[in-house]
Image (spheres, rainbow, N blue to C red):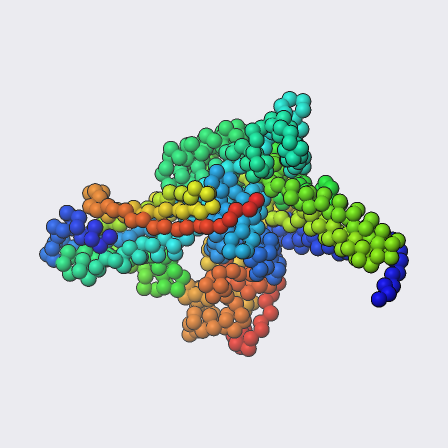
Amino acid sequence: MTIRVTKIPALVLLAALTELLCLLTACQAGPDTVLINHVANGQYGQARAHVLTNLTQDRSDRAYLLDRMKLAVVTLDDGYPEMAQTTFESVYNILRTQGINRDNTVASVVLTENVKFWKGEPFEQALAMIYYGCQQAAMGYWDNARAGAQSSLFNLKDFSGHFATGQDKPQLIDTEAILQRSIAYERAKAKGGDPDTATKQPDTSDFLNSGYAVHESDFVLGYMLNAIANRQLARDQEAQDNFAVAVRIKPDLAPLARELRGGNYNTVLVVGWGLGPQKVAYGPDGSLAKFTPRYLSDSAGLIVRVQAGGASGGTSGGTSEGGMQTRGVYPIVTDVNRMAADHMWNNLEDVRKAKSLIGDVMLAGGLIAAGVGVDQRNETAIYAGLGAAAAGLFLKATAHADTRHMEVFPQRFYIVPLQVAGPGDVIMLQVEGKPGSRLLLTGLAPPAPGQPALLRMVRLVSTANAPQWATSGQILYANDVAPASPGSQPSGPDMRPYIAGGRSSQPPTARAMAAYHQAGHYNGMTSNELANIYRAEGLYWDIGDMGGIGGKHLLEGGNIVLSPQAGTTGFARLFGQLHPPYRPRSEELKALIK
Amino acid sequence: MAQSLAGSPVIAARGVESEPWAVSMQRVTNLTSDVLTPSEMWYAVQRVRSGLPMQALAQQRNIRFVIPAEQVRKMRADPDIGGDIGDFDESFGATRNVTHVMTATFRSVTRFNSLGNDRSDLYYAEFEMLDMASGVPVWTDRFEFKRRAKGKVWD
């Protein structure tokens, strides 16, 4: 048999392999800029709908947990803790019930029943747990909030002990520094040397799995929420212990801890601002990953002002500005940028770098072999060489760090204790030096006497200028959560459902129907008949009917009629501005309007 | 639980002519290290309660279980059937005449096997029945539940 060997130009070969490499690296997904934009603008309803549209169903996909974390976070940020319940449960089941190590550190990937579950960076896991705790507290379950906060306080892996002290110690102990130390350790072992000399640590068989010291969590937000929850459960000693740890880690929280211990509040606001850091690839072949800030860290406090009962003046204490009394300026509790930059809160990407190194060797060897094969007219050698080069390229591409991450966490958190007098109070929040963050909360009623404090998760807008709805301070629609503002209460023709041209966004309940009758509308019509018209329009107002997950609100072009909790950003966005008229779809509604 | 309850001296001493007891179950308190959904907790409580001989308790000991206060509040606030619109107004539930409250508190202990890859969370529920007039517990007991989480850890 004659082997026809065609000399393959080296440039063609290189071009083909390079194209393969480009195709493979193009699979690395960038950040979801649409989602980021929605969240930065406070459009959490749009954000929720966007995530729902792209929700992964493949449990082995790294995005499976990511998608659900995003959905849960933006749903709670929008003021819908009940709607977030199902999603938080599935996130929690993956995070908590698998992969908790014996030393109470967490794993980032768990293999069970031959399916790999990606669990996220340790700091992402902790933030997901704290969000779950806040969601439970927002529904009045302080015992579960305590459990969620405790779940966020897992131990960390501290490799800093392997680094020299003083001048030799690197300023930043990042994953690259740890990787280099790991390689030095294992090379010393491979050469038969004393790895202790390389790392000044006792011999261990696997540096990355056993070469760390267990370090207690320094997640201040976790300790603070744990303390507040214990305080609500009348477990004062445990509350005191957690406040003490938080203050030890961050001493400027001492006045806030004193205020929270004192108990002179009936509402707690957990306030988020900004967007957390972005995960980027760096190092050889982009095999390492690090987090770089999207919103810069600073020490700006959160200004809190209250206008009692919506009238000027207000209660005693604090300075007054335009009828608003300043309650105080509250410090940052947790800076997510700093958390993400700390190696203890990160994954270790050494495996990717090792793959990249192997790829470099194979790639060089593969091209040489292919060239030799061509020169010697050896087809076998050519294909073997190309195969090795392709395998090497494939490894290089797969060695590239996966930069998918939780884009929607805030950059920072604040905690604000308040004594709310009634739903007429207007609460102003603004981060110092950031006028775009200004937000007026409305409709927040105090808890019933004898009941524990309320908690509200409030996510501030993160743009340069505050949208009009964020500063309106008005409730322009009748709803099933809080009364409309005095002077804005719908009456007459306005006291009809929004879908019929009015300003009521209440679900079609008997109470809503009674209000319409009182305004002179739909006499003789029952709430069941009205509910049938809503169903004909494809609208939902029961979480069970929605499968536990809902999209946008009716006022924003969606199909859910559930109101967010009063005193949240979602409530301000929906009811603090007028929305375009509704377009009827069904014949039943058109007949009603006529 | 049925045996424990029936065997307690206070209850064993009661008869059909004893002053009626109306027992209301309070919401379960979760003091474990894990978030437990309300349905999980109420299911565990219901499993224990389903072992109770309700008819026997009512007929022989004059003890009835009535709708919990938490459920009453929800019904009063319901926009379809609640106070200002339906029949479940402020007087609803008042005729329950609750004399005793039963509480349940969940606690947990976490254990690992020697290899560290098999974790068991041992849960136990502490039940207590309180006399509302005196605040004195008339019965307490504890029941265990087990939940396992198994998976290989890969970092």
Residue A72 vs residue A15, the one in the foreground: A15
The image shows residue A93 at horizontal and vertical percentages of 48, 52
Task: Give residue A17's quadrant in the image.
Answer: bottom right
Residue A424 drawn above or below residue A433: below
The image shows residue A339 at horizontal and vertical percentages of 59, 37
Q: Is residue A13 left or right of residue A73?
A: right
Considering every residue shown, the one lying at the far top of the view is A166
The image shows residue B19 at horizontal and vertical percentages of 13, 53
Q: How many marks?
A: 0
Residue A13 vs residue B73, the one in the foreground: A13
Q: Is residue A475 left or right of residue A165?
A: left
The image shows residue A410 at horizontal and vertical percentages of 59, 44
Q: Is residue A424 left or right of residue A179?
A: left
Residue A238 vs residue A405, the one in the foreground: A405
Q: Residue at x 67, y 22 (%)?
A: A167
Q: Residue at x 82, y 59 (%)?
A: A379
Q: Residue at x 54, y 44 (%)?
A: A107
